[in-house]
Amino acid sequence: MPEQSSNLDLPATLREIVEHKRVEVERARSTAPQSELVARCRDLEPARDFVGSLLARASTGSTAVIAEIKRRSPSAGLIRSEYDGMGFDPSVIAQGYSKAGASAISCLTDEKFFGGDPAFVQRIRGSVDLPVLRKDFMIDPYQVHEARAMGADAILLIAECLTDTQIAEMLALAGDLGMGTLLESHDPGNLDRMLRLVEGVEFGRYLIGVNNRDLRTMTTDLAHTTDLVDRVPDRSVLVSESGIRTPADLAMLRGHGVRIVLVGEHLMRQPQPGVALGELLA
């Protein structure tokens, strides 16, 4: 049977991002060879336990939140006007999230499409004790070493962008480097594919994310998670992503056994993202 992947059916924006990422990776590889990144990784302190932090919070009966730091998006543009230039301080936002009860931080590092910066990861990590997820479009094992070298504790793998071989290779490499992995999908078929690929992988190394945003229409529907929960044998590792705005949303998800969420744009649209997270968790 041919290897499964959605690469041939990517929405236009996602295809553009992936194509640009290939160029970006080759440019980075010519500047810093993988051997150099491997050496840098060996000198780092161990990664913080991304998956363990979230599972521990969720085990108390509360919702564990991966709070996201994002400046812009291809569909929405700049999320707030004050995030232009020096008005965007990921360290301050991370501190607000930490005080409000976040269990982990997600940081966009893609520069062209999301206004991110790899340097944000170390700035965030130096300002809070929480584990940090590097959120980017991972298409090459080089980027996994790159993520660890920049101080990230976990990576994101988007099933719609990757083949089975790519997912398996990068998931294993992240584990070897002591990092967690958030495996994300939107389409039910890709969710099933990821669940098959993590069979036999050590518990505590990965989480399974359902993106409530349709990558073709860019609309969000929280019911997308609840429609898919029965496909996931162990709901403790399930993460609902996007479209979460109210305490009632969290309560509804808990009612379906989903106790980990990723919340980004809703928080980043508020004048004080940390205060908004506190209100969400109230």
Image: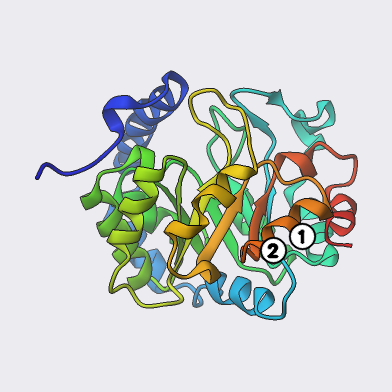
Query: For the N terminus, which image quadrant?
Result: top left
Q: Amino acid at mark 2?
A: Gly
Q: Position of residue 88 (x, y in %)?
A: 77, 39
Judge left or right: residue 259 versus residue 170: right
Q: CA distance from mark 1 to mark 2?
A: 6 Å
Q: Amino acid at mark 1?
A: Ala
Secondary structure beneath label 1: helix
Q: Looking at this rendering, what residue extends furthest in the top direction?
A: 12
Q: Position of residue 131 (x, y in %)?
A: 61, 67
Judge left or right: residue 150 versus residue 79: left
**Quadrant assignment, res 109:** top right
Q: Residue at x 42, y 73 (%)?
A: 178
**Quadrant assignment, res 253:** bottom right
Q: Residue at x 63, y 34 (%)?
A: 220
What residue does disc 1 label?
251
| Label 1 Cα neighbours within 10 Å, binned few <14 / some 14-19 / many ≥20 | some
**Quadrant assignment, res 267:** top right
Determine if residue 30 is in view.
yes
Query: For the C terminus, which image quadrant?
Result: bottom right
Pointers 1 and 2 in contact (C-beta within 8 Å):
yes
Determine if residue 118 is in view.
no
Q: Position of residue 248 (x, y in %)?
A: 81, 53
Q: Nearer the viewer, residue 223 or 160?
A: 223
Residue 115's tag is none
What residue does disc 2 label?
255
Q: Residue at x 76, y 60 (%)?
A: 251
